[in-house]
């Protein structure tokens, strides 16, 4: 699977043009619209991977890429709320608790409350561990949600928990996810370093396509689903 993923882009007949376009769009992502188009291409790459295609797709039907990119971002935003909302609530609780402990300690005649401070500190550590654990879970399931969305082409598929779990909780997806993380860390680090001379922009695009290939291929193998695209 890893060799298929690493050669996915290069097996395309116009892989040079595809890589250049992808790199330029990455560079222009600050303008927002190019970012949507780029995300749409990742959707198309996942569709190709899930269908068993050996080569990456070309940049065609730019309007379709824009729409699919917007949909993918909606899916990812929805899953990110599972992390953002608990973190926001946790920060409020910690802020209120910190203020309460400080006011209680500074009250006239109040004795230092070591137990209160210790309890508050433990609560903070537990909360941080819970948020960290939730982040890991979302980080594992969100790519599966993206793959399911790409395979089915509907926003609802990105939040179809039963199907997402049926694919994510398989050995095929777990291995693919782990390989994607390794590729992202190793090649992503190289790409980040090369960004200084702009070459890294194109390397990062290659890394992104490779990881999306692994996510979609692993998920599709896990659920035994072939993309309709």
Image: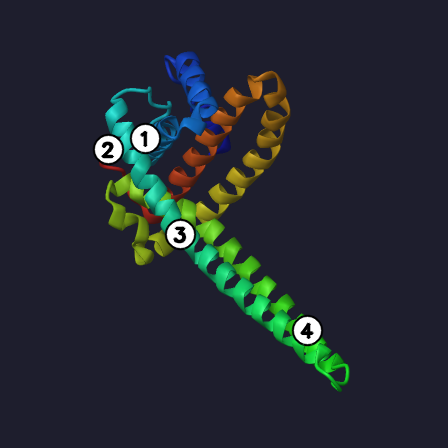
Of the residues under marks 1 and 2, which one precedes in the sequence? 1
Tell me residue 199's x, y (percent): 56, 17
In the rendered image, is residue 132 in sight?
Answer: yes
What residue do we see at 44% from left, 37% from top? 214
Secondary structure category for the residue under label 3 = helix
In the image, farthest residue toward the front:
108
Foreground tag (1 vs 4): 4
In the rendered image, is residue 168 in sight?
Answer: no
Foreground tag (1 vs 3): 3
Tell me residue 47's x, y (percent): 31, 34
- Whether residues under marks 3 and 2 lie with C-beta atoms below 8 angstroms apart, the answer is no
Q: Which residue is identified by label 1?
A: 44
Foreground tag (3 vs 2): 3
Is residue 101 depicted above or below 157 in this figure? Answer: below
Is residue 55 depicted above or below 120 in this figure? Answer: above
What residue do we see at 49% from left, 60% from top? 88
Task: Determine which of the numbered discs, if any, sits on residue 229 in the image.
Answer: 2
Q: Within 10 angstroms of label 3, few (less than 14), some, or many (20 or more) residues?
A: many
Query: Where, by quadrant of the figure, is residue 151 drawn?
Result: top left
Tell me residue 206's x, y (percent): 48, 25
Identify the image's colour scheme: rainbow, by chain, secondary structure or one colour.
rainbow
Task: Determine which of the numbered discs, if any, sits on residue 79 in the image.
Answer: 3
Secondary structure category for the residue under label 1 = helix
Foreground tag (4 vs 3): 4
Of the residues under marks 1 and 4, which one precedes in the sequence? 1
């Amino acid at each position: 699977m890893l060799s298929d993923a690493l050669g996915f882009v290069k097996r395309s007949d116009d892989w040079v043009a595809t890589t250049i376009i992808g790199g330029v769009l990455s560079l222009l992502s600050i303008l927002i619209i190019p970012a949507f188009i780029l995300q749409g291409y990742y959707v198309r790459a996942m569709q190709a991977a899930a269908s068993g295609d050996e080569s990456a797709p070309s940049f065609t039907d730019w309007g379709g890429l824009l729409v699919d990119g917007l949909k993918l971002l909606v899916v990812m935003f929805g899953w990110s709320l599972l992390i953002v909302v608990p973190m926001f609530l946790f920060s409020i609780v910690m802020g209120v608790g910190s203020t309460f402990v400080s006011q209680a300690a500074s009250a006239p005649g109040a004795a230092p409350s070591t137990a209160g401070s210790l309890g508050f500190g433990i609560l903070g550590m537990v909360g941080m561990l819970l948020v960290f654990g939730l982040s890991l879970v979302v980080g594992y399931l969100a790519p599966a949600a993206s793959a399911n969305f790409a395979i089915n082409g509907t926003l609802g598929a990105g939040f179809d928990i039963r199907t997402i779990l049926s694919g994510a909780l398989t050995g095929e997806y777990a291995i693919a996810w782990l390989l994607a993380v390794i590729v992202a860390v190793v090649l992503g680090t190289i790409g980040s370093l090369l960004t200084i001379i702009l070459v890294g922009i194109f390397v990062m695009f290659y890394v992104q396509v490779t990881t999306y290939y692994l996510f979609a291929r692993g998920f599709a193998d896990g659920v035994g689903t072939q993309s309709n695209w």
